[in-house]
Image (cartoon, rainbow, N blue to C red):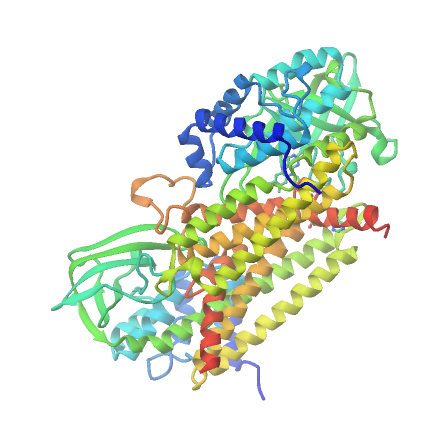
Amino acid sequence: MDMSFSPDDQTFRAEVRQFLQDRLPERLSEKVRLQQELTKAEIEEWHAVLNEKGWLAGNWPREFGGAGWTAIQRHIFDEESALASAPRVLPFGIAMLGPVLQKFGSKEQQDRFLPRILNGQDWWCQGYSEPGAGSDLASVKTTAVRDGDDYVVNGQKTWTTLGQHANWIFCLVRTDPTAKAQEGISFLLIDMTSPGITVRPIVLLDGTPEVNEVFFDDVRVPAENLVGEENKGWTYAKYLLTHERTNIAGVGFATAGLAALKRIARAQQAHGKPLIENPLFAARLAEIEIDLMAMATTNLRMLAQAAAGQVPGAESSMLKLKGTQIRQAINDLTRRAVGPWALAFPSEAVEGANDDLPPGPPEAAAATRAYLNNRKLSIYGGSNEIQRGIIAKSLLGL
Amino acid sequence: MDFGFTDEQTMLGESLARTLERGGDAAALSELGAGLALMTEEAGGFGGTGRDILMVFRTLGRAAAVTQLLDSVVLGAGILSAAGEADLAEAAASGEARIAVALDEPGQRYDGKVSTRAEGERLTGEKSLVPGAEDATHLIVKTTDGLWLVEAGAEGLGLRGYALMDGGRAAEVTLRDTPARRIGDAALLDRPLAAAILAVCADALGAMEKAVELTTDYLKTRKQFGRPIGSFQALQHRMADLLTEVEQARSAVWNLAGNLDTADRDRHVAATKSLLGRVALYVAEETIQLHGGIGMTEEYELAPLARRLLAADARFGDSDHHLERFIAASAA
Ligand SMILES: Cc1cc2nc3c(=O)[nH]c(=O)nc-3n(C[C@H](O)[C@H](O)[C@H](O)COP(=O)(O)OP(=O)(O)OC[C@H]3O[C@@H](n4cnc5c(N)ncnc54)[C@H](O)[C@@H]3O)c2cc1C
C-alpha cells in the first residue's frame, strides 16, 4: 500500500501553494477566513486571476480552455485553495454547465458559451428546482412550447443560488406534458435579460439573500438554445449532477474550518484556561478531527479508484453524507466556541457600521451566520435523506 | 402528585397566547398581568412560582415573542425584590420601569467572574451582552463587591447596541466613574438567576413544541414523488425521535419548575439547562432539515423559532457548561 501522492502530484501541490501565496489578495482571503460574504465583483476578481493562469476550469479538457487536471490534481487544488482561504470557484458555469455543453452541446453552443464562462462575461445559475419539484426533480412543471423558431417558457424556478447576479440560467423545462415524468424534459439555456423574467430574492435564516425565485411569463427563447435533443434533458441533468458531486466531501473546507476553530478555541478562555484545554470541548473537537481524518482517507481511496479508471458510483453519496455532517459539526462547535457572543446577530443592513460592531472575538459575528447558512449543506444537491436512499438501494440492494 | 396548572395559570396562559397571536405589545402584556404573574405575593405580584414562570414562558416561546419579561422582570425585578427594593421591583413587574441586568464581561465566557469595581459610590468597568440595556430605565450591575443600581443616562455610562439572534437587542456597556447605589451581595442573584434559566428553558420548550407541530403539519401536506413526504418511514421515525426528545425536555422543565425552591435547585438548574440546550439544537436542526429549502428561509415561521432555540442554548451557559456544573454538583 502506498498512501503518498506521486512526485508529480507533490510538485503540483507546491506549484498551487506558491501561486496562491503570490496571487491570492489578502483582502479576499481575510473575508473568506472570517466567513464574510463576497461581493459579485470579488468573486469575479478571483475567477479572473485563475483564468489568467489557465486554472479556472481545472475539470475541463485543454481543448476547451480548461486545465485538464486529473481527479487527484483537482483535489489538490481544491484542498490548497480552501486551506489558503481562497474564494471557491462558483460551480454553475465551470463544474455544472461546462461539462454538459462539452458532452452534449452543439459546436455552436460550445464556441459561443464556453469562452464566456472562462472570461467572466457570463454568470450562470442553475434552474432545476421548482416549488413542487425538490427531491422529486422529475416533476418539474415549467413548460417550454415550441412556437416557430422559439420556445415559449412559462413557470417558476426557485432556490436559484446567486441568480441575482446571473445573466444566464440553465433550466429543466417540460416539453412533452404527455410523456412519463422523466421523458418529457428538456435542457434549455435562457438569457436572464429576456422580457418576461422576474427575479425575486429569498432571504435565508442567516439574513442573506443568497437564493431567488425566478418567474417566467411567456419568455421567448430561441430554439438554438436547446441543449442536445428535445425531451432528453433528464439524461443531461443526471450527467450534470454527477459533476456537481465532485469535491462533494469538502475535505479542504472542513480542514480549513477545523483550523479556524482551533484558533478560536486557543484564544477563548474557559475557567481561566484556553478553551482548547477544556476536557469536554477538547473531546468534542478530537472526535470531529478523527472523523475528518477517516473521511479524508475515504475520499482519497475513491480518488485512487477514479484514477485507476473506475467510475465512482453511489460511493459519492457516502462522501456527501459524511462530508456535510462533519462540516456542520465544525460549524456547530465553532458557534459554541465563541460562547455567549454567538448571541449577537448583526443584520446585513448594519454590518460594518462603526456604532454597531458586534461584541466578542472577530470570528463571533460570522459563527452563527455560517452555522445557519450551512444547514443548507444537508439539504441541497440531493438532500442527505435522498443520499441515504441511494446508499441503501445501490450499495446494499435494499 | 400533580403536574398540572391552577385554573388561574391556565387562564393566564390562554389569554396570553391570544394576545400574542393578535400581535400584543408590551402594554397589552402588562395589562394581562404577565409581569405580576412572575412575582410572588410578598413581592407585590400574584404568582412567581416555578409553575407560573413555566406557563408564561412556554407561551412566549411558542409565539417567538420578543419581550422584556425575562430580563426586566424575572431577573431584574427578582433581584430588586430580593434586595428589598420593593417599589422599583413592582414598577418593573408592571412595565413602568425597565431593568437591564449587567452580569457578563468581555472575555468572560459564562464564568460569571467580574472585574468591574466600585470606588466610593462610583463604578468603573465594562459589561458585555446586556439585553435590553438601550431601553432600560435602570441597570443592575454586578461588581467585585456585589450588586449596584445605575440609572439610565447616568454620568459616564456608555452603551453600544446591536441585534440579537432571538430578535431582541443587547449592548456593550461601559462605566467610567458612574454614580451608583449598592443594593446588596451577589448572592441575591441565586434565585432570580435560577428562575431566569427556568424561563429560558420553558421558552425553548414552547419553541420546540411549536417547531415540531409545524414540521408535522408540513410532512402531511408537502408532496414529493406523488405522496406526502410524511408517508416515508424514514421521516416518520425522525419525527418519532423528535417527539421523544421533546418529551424529555418537557420533563426536565417540569423538574426544574418543581425544584426552584428546594435545596437541590442547583443540580436541577444544571441538569435542565444542559438537556434543554442539547435538545433545542437537535430540534432546530432536524426541523429545518425536514422542511428542506423552506426551512432555510427567513419568511417561514420556523426561522425565528430556530434562532430562538440556538439563543436559548447560548444564554446563561450552554449545554456543555451546565454539563460540567452537573458533574461537579453530582460529585460533591
Ligand atoms: C441554500 C440553497 C441553495 C440552493 N440552490 C439551488 C440552485 O442553485 N438551483 C436549484 O435548482 N436548486 C437549488 N436548491 C434546491 C435544492 O436542491 C432543494 O432544496 C433540494 O433538492 C430539496 O428539495 P426541497 O427543498 O423541495 O425539499 P423536499 O424535497 O420537499 O424535502 C423535504 C424533506 O423531505 C425529505 N425527503 C424528500 N423525499 C424523501 C424521500 N423519498 N425519502 C426520505 N426523505 C425524503 C428531504 O430530504 C427533506 O428533508 C437550493 C436549496 C437551498 C436550500
Asked where in the image residue A174 lies, by quadrant, the reply is top right
Q: Residue B260, position in %: x, y?
A: 44, 80
The answer to whether one can see residue B18 in this image is no
Q: Residue A381, position in %: x, y?
A: 68, 39
Q: Which residue is at the far bottom?
A: B1
Q: Residue B314, position in %: x, y?
A: 45, 60
Marker count (numbered):
0
Of residues B282 and A298, the one nearer the viewer is: A298
The residue positioned 58% from the left and 63% from the top of the image is: B208
Asked where in the image residue B231 lies, by quadrant, the reply is bottom right
Q: Is residue B281 left or right of residue B85?
A: right
The answer to whether one can see residue A171 in this image is yes
The C terminus of chain B lies in quadrant: bottom left
Compared with B318, B33 (above or below) is below
The N terminus of chain B lies in quadrant: bottom right
The residue positioned 66% from the left and 69% from the top of the image is: B244
Q: Which residue is at the far right?
A: A179
Q: In terms of image quarters, where does ligand 1 lie? A: top right
Compared with A333, A71 (above or below) is above
Compared with A31, B265 (above or below) is below
Asked where in the image residue A68 lies, by quadrant, the reply is top right
Q: Is residue A162 left or right of residue A36?
A: right
Q: Residue B4, position in %: x, y?
A: 57, 81
Q: Which residue is at the far left?
A: B120
